[in-house]
Image (spheres, grey):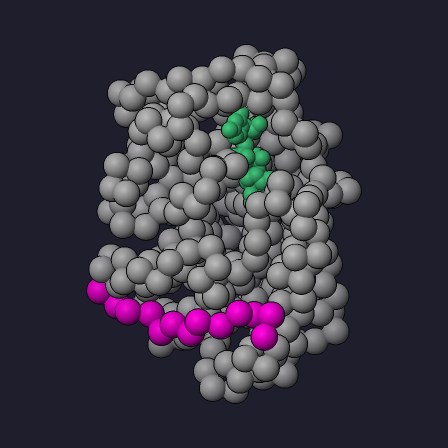
Amino acid sequence: MKKILVTGGLGYIGSHTVVELQNEGYEVVIIDNLSNTTIDVLDKITSITGIKPAFEEIDLKNKEAVKHFFKYYDVDGVIHFAASKAVGESVHEPLKYYENNITTLTYVLQEMVDNSVSNFIFSSSCTVYGQADELPITESAPTKPAESPYGATKKMGEIIIEDTSKATDLKAIALRYFNPIGAHETAKIGELPIGVPQNLIPYVVQTAAGIRECLSIFGDDYDTVDGTAVRDYIHVVDLAKAHIAALNRLLNGENKANCEYFNIGTGTGSSVLEVVNTFEKATGKKVNYKIVDRREGDITAAYANTDLANNELGWKAKLNLETALASAWKWQENQ
Ligand code: WQD
C-alpha cells in the first residue's frame, strides 16, 4: 500500500483529500500544526472512511522535526497543503507569510530530496494569473505580479519547486485551484468558521444562518453579466479528487515533464449575485445583502479552461454550483 504524507491534512482541502486518498486505498500520514484547524477533524475523517490516518502534530517551521519525520516515515509521495491563506492578513503580516509558506516549503523539499521521495503535489492558486487577459484561463496564460504576499508565496512556491525539479529527481505537479467551496456530503468535514469569514461562501452561509446580519457584495459596477465579480467555484470534493488524479499520474510515471501545472476549476464562471440566487434556490434560505464598494485587489473575472486537466489528468469536475452550495449549507446546519 503506497503511503502518502499530507501536510495541512486536517485543514479544509487537506481533510477532504485525505478522505479521497483513503477511498483510493492509499495509506495516509498527516502533518498539521493545528494553527487553523482542530484535532477532532482527525476523528471526523476516521468516521467517514473507517480508517484512522497516522497523525503527527508538527510545525513545518521546525526544521529538525521535519528532518526527523522523513527519517522515521518512509513515504511514496507528498501532497503539500500546509500554508497560511488569508489574503488580507498577508498584506499586514508579509514576513509571517514568507516564513510559513516559503521557508517551510524549502524544508519539506530538502528532506524529500535527501530521502529520495520524488512525488510532490503542490497546492497553488489561480491567483498567480491576476486578472488574466483572456478567459477562460489556460495554464499558458502569463502569470502576473502578485496582488498580495499570499499570492506571491504561491508564485514563488511554483518557482522553487520547478527549479528543484530541474536540479534533482523531484517530480512535481502544481494544482492551480480556482475557488474551493462546499463540504463533504456527510457534513462531518467542511470549511471551519474561524473568525469573520473573508471568503464569499462562508459569509453567505453564516448570513443565511443569522450569524451575520447582512452580506456586503463588494461592487456591482464590474464589466460582467450583472455587474458583480465572476469566479469559478469548484466543489471541494471535486478538487480533492483532482489531487488523486495528479498523484496517480506521478506514481505511474505518466508525467510529461518534471514539473507540471494544471488549472483545477469547473470551467464555468458565476457572479456573486448568481451565487446568492443559486444558494437561495438550493436551500430555500434568504440571504440579506447590500451592495458596497469594491474590495481592494479584487479582479473582475476568473474561470478556468480545464482542457489540460480533463485530457492529461483524466479528471473533470462533476458537482455543480447548486450541489456545492447545498453542501455548504448542510455543513453550517451541522455546526
Ligand atoms: C469571491 C468573490 C469578492 C466576500 C480568494 C483567494 C484565492 C483563493 C480563493 C486560496 C469576489 C466577493 C467576497 C464578501 C463579496 N484562495 N465577495 N463579499 O477573492 O476570488 O479568491 O479565495 O487559494 O487565492 O484570493 O475569493 O471568496 O474572497 O471572493 O462580495 O463578503 O466574492 O469580491 O468577487 P477570491 P473570495
290 left or right of 300 in image: left
Q: Tell me, yes or no, whether the highlighted magenta stretch contains residue 123.
A: no
* Ligand 1 sits in quadrant: top right
Compare residues 240 and 105 and report the one nearer the observer. 105
23 left or right of 60 in image: left
Q: Identify which residue is drawn at 54% across, 80% down.
A: 65
Q: Tell me, yes or no, whether the highlighted magenta stretch contains residue 55.
A: yes
Secondary structure mostly taken by the magenta-highlighted segment of the chain: loop
Q: Position of residue 229 (x, y in %)?
A: 58, 23
Q: Which residues are magenta?
A: 49-62
Q: Position of residue 334 (x, y in %)?
A: 25, 42
Compare residues 258 and 287 and report the one nearer the observer. 287
Q: How many marks?
A: 0
32 left or right of 151 in image: left
Quadrant showing the N terminus? bottom left
Q: Identify which residue is drawn at 60% across, 51% down.
A: 124
Q: Identify which residue is drawn at 31% across, 34% down.
A: 329
Report whether residue 111 is seen: yes
Compare residues 102 and 203 and report the one nearer the observer. 203
